[in-house]
Every structure is written in structure tokens, then in C-alpha cells.
Amino acid sequence: MARLGVGLRPRVLLAMVLTGAVTLGVAALALLGPLETRLRHDASSNVITAVLGAIPAFDDAVTPKRRIDPGAVGVIARALARRTGARVAVVDGAGNRVTDTDPEVIDPFDDARLALASGHTVHDYRFGRLRVATTVRIAGHRYALVLRKRLNEVASANRVVRDAFLVAAGVGLATALLLGVGLSSGLVRRVRKLRDSAQQMEELGLEAPAPVDHSRDEVGALARTFAAMQSRLRREEASRRSFVATASHELRTPLASLDGMLELLRDDISSQPVDIDDARKRVVQAQEQSLRLGHLAADLLDLSRLDAAIELRSEPVELAELGRAVVAEFDHRSVREDRPVQFDAPPEPVWATGDPGSIARIVRILLDNALRASPAGERVTIEVGAGEDGRATVAVSDRGPGVPERERELIFERFQRGETAIGQGFGLGLAIGRELATRMGGSLELAPSGPGARFVLHLAADEITSPIATP
Ligand SMILES: Nc1ncnc2c1ncn2[C@@H]1O[C@H](COP(=O)(O)OP(=O)(O)OP(=O)(O)O)[C@@H](O)[C@H]1O
Ligand SMILES: [Mg+2]
């Protein structure tokens, strides 16, 4: 057995885990970045709104002499600091702090200079810290109102979501792994069972037990197809064996009688005086047996060709002309046996599609049977024409005993003769005829009504040449 590469189970597992990991990774990328940006933006907007809202309050931070009142500025700054949770400072143009809620911490206040120079509110976010600077006018001078805030809530919200993602990823991957193990184990077990069945069939032949899998999935369907194929092969093998057994038996019988006749012939010609009359009789009988054997050999050859599925020709065939030619072959016999053959065909040609040799063979089989079944003096009729369904037909009828109801289908099987079969035969004619008809896309049937028998060959009408095929 060829060595297996990477098994089904690791591949299924890898696929499931990879799918889970990629899905969660993409979801994390798609969510975490935008979420942080959004949270930061919201927090910044809140702080900036509070800063802008506090600006008018600084108008009142003046002494009665209209000078800046650092105490009052400090009160406003602390109130703003409480409201925003930020460090708040007021800085003059030279970078000196008028007030600062966190005086211990050194800060270059570079953004304050920027805000004073531009007259706009400036803000940025660096290393988790929001910086806002805007200008306020106190006692006719411009100062910078500066805020510093660590946006911890953004980082912590982000951390919560990231942790949740990690937990989800862990649970998701573990679930994928568990499901993958369960699914792939079941699948691998069932596929192995199928492989074992195939191996057993290789070792034991068709008698090995068929695989059983009732699941309604693809593996179950494969097992059922496998079992169906095995049982078909068994049937074919059984019919092949019975065919070979019957054929050898059928061959042995005429051979044995031929042997006996030749022995009697030898006795006749060795006796003194030579029994010439009996010898003549034996020669005639031996000839009959040899003819019989010749027929059987031809039939067996036909069947083996059919079994080997040799391609039949498919071409336009004019049935009336072909029928006439076959009837002519039977002229001598028909006169000798006093069973006239009547040939009926429409004035116009009847074109069918098929193999001319096979169609002629079928007509010969039907005429031979009809002449055998027909009482002396009665007419056998062969009709060529168009069937009701637009197909081309050849029908052979006789006024013989007909076919009993229980034998109607049986007579189309190999080596099956009717109980009241007339003359010597092997029961192969109709089997060959039906198989040939089927292989040409047509059919060979026994018409339902009597008296006598009427066999009908249906063939596809030739679409180009036949007038019956035109609607
Ligand atoms: N025209 C018919 N009338 C009555 N019975 C028929 C007619 N044609 C066929 N049968 C029955 O069908 C059986 C099978 O016919 P089939 O042609 O297959 O074999 P056969 O004629 O017995 O032998 P073979 O054709 O091999 O020499 C015949 O034995 C006969 O019982
Ligand atoms: Mg026959």
C-alpha cells in the first residue's frame, strides 16, 4: 500500500484552527483600532468643550484696579480641573505660570506659545496624554489656558475589549479544536472503514462484505455507491458464470451426438457389406449437428461481442430495402416448408438510424422464429413502417401458437426457450436481438395481442432522410 502523506485529521484540524484564528484576528484588527480612535476622539471633544466653556469666566478674574487676579484665576482653573479631571494651568506669553493645578511638574508649555501665536485652540495626543491649549483674555492681556490629561479610560476600555477578545479567541480556538477532533475522528473512522472494505475486496474478491454507512452525507453516499457497485459486479459475475456454464453444456451436447454419429458412421462403413443407407443417414444427421454447432458458435460470438461493448455503427438505413433483402434469404426455406412470407412496406422509403448488419440480424432472428412457429400453409408477415410515436418499425407476425403470458419476458433472456418451443434451438436469438436493438437506441418487444405472435423492432427514425421524422 502506498504510504500516506499528511492525514485527513491534521488537515481538518489545521483548517478549523486557522479559520478560527484568522476570523478573530481580522475582527480584532477591525474593531480595536477604530474603537480606540473613537474613544480618544470623544474624550478629547469633551475636554475641549469644557475648556472653551470656561473661557468667559476668566473675564471676571481681575482686581478692582482692572489687574489680573491670580487668586481668582486659580479658583477658575481648579474648578475646570475638577470638571475635566485634567491638570490646568494659565501661562503668560513668556511661559510663566499664573496658576497651575499641578505646580510640581515641569512642562515646557510649547503648545501654549503655539496657541498664543496663532490665536487658535491647539490640541494633540501623545503617549496616552491629551494636551489642549487655547487663549484667554484677562485684564486686556492674552494668556494661554493649558490642559494636560492622561486618557486612562481610553486605554482601560481598550484593554477590556482586548482581554475579551483574547478570551473569545481562546474559547473559540478550543471549541474549533474540540469540534475538529470530533468531526475529523468520525470522518477518518468512516473513510478508513471504506478503505478496509476496498482492501478486503482486493484480497477476497467480490464476496467480501459490502461497506455499510447509513449517514446521509457524502461519505455515506460513497459507501452506498460502493456497495451498489459491488452488488452489480456480483450479479454480472454470477450471470457470466452461468452463461459460461450453460454455453459449455450446450456445446457439449451436440458435440457428443456428433461424436456418436461419426462412430456409427465408422461402424456402417467398416461392416461387411457396407451399410450405405445407414451411413447416408448418419452423414445427414452429423451435418445437422455440425450446422447446429455452427449456429451456436455464431450466437456465442455475437454475445461475446455485445458483452465486450463493441461499438455498433450508427447510420441511415432504409428498412424496406433491407427487409426485402432478408426476406429473399428465406425464399428457399419458405417455399420448402410451405410457409409464405408476405412483405408489406409503404411506397416511400423508411429511414432509420442504426447498424445495418445488426438490423438484418434481428430481422433474421424474428423470421426464423416465426417460420418455426407458423403452421404449414399459414403466412408470415413482415411489415416496415412508421410507429405511432414517430419511430421506424419492423414487425414480424405469424399465426402460430403465440407466446404464453408467463413467458413474455423470459424468452428475451439468454438460453431461455419457451415450454412449447418448436425445433432445436438454444434460446439465444431473442436475447441477441433485444440487446442489439437496445444498443442501437431502439427496442425489441412482443406485441400484446394475439392470435399468433407479433414481434416489433422499434428504431429511431433517421432525422435527415426519413419523411416520417418531419413533423
Ligand atoms: N414467433 C414465435 N411464436 C411463438 N413463440 C416464440 C416465437 N418466437 C420465439 N418464441 C419463443 O421464444 C423462445 C426464445 O426464442 P429465441 O429465438 O430466443 O430462441 P430459440 O428460437 O428457441 O433458439 P435460437 O434462436 O437460439 O436458435 C423460443 O424458444 C419460443 O418458445
Ligand atoms: Mg430463435
Image (cartoon, rainbow, N blue to C red):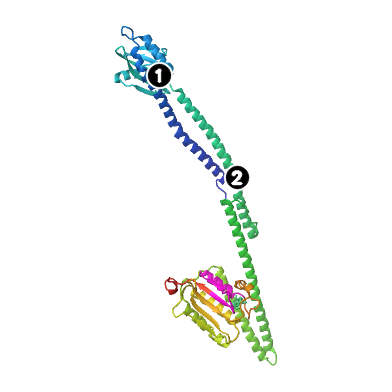
Range of residues picked out in magenta: 427-456
Residue 245: x percent and y percent?
65, 70
Q: Is residue 407 above or below residue 79?
A: below
Residue 140: x percent and y percent?
29, 12
Res 91 seen here: no
Q: Nearer the viewer, residue 222 or 112?
A: 112
Residue assigned mark 2: 185
Q: Mark 1: which amino acid?
A: Arg
Q: Secondary structure at mark 1?
A: strand
Q: Secondary structure at mark 2?
A: helix
Residue assigned mark 1: 148
Q: For this view, does 415 lie left or right of residue 341?
A: right
Q: Mark 2: which amino acid?
A: Ser
Determine the residue located farthest toward the right in the rendered image: 272
The residue at the point 43 percent across, 27 percent down is 39
Residue 206: x percent and y percent?
63, 60
Q: Nearer the viewer, residue 333 or 145?
A: 145
The residue at the point 51 percent across, 81 percent down is 326
Determine the residue located farthest toward the bottom in the rendered image: 273
Res 128 seen here: yes
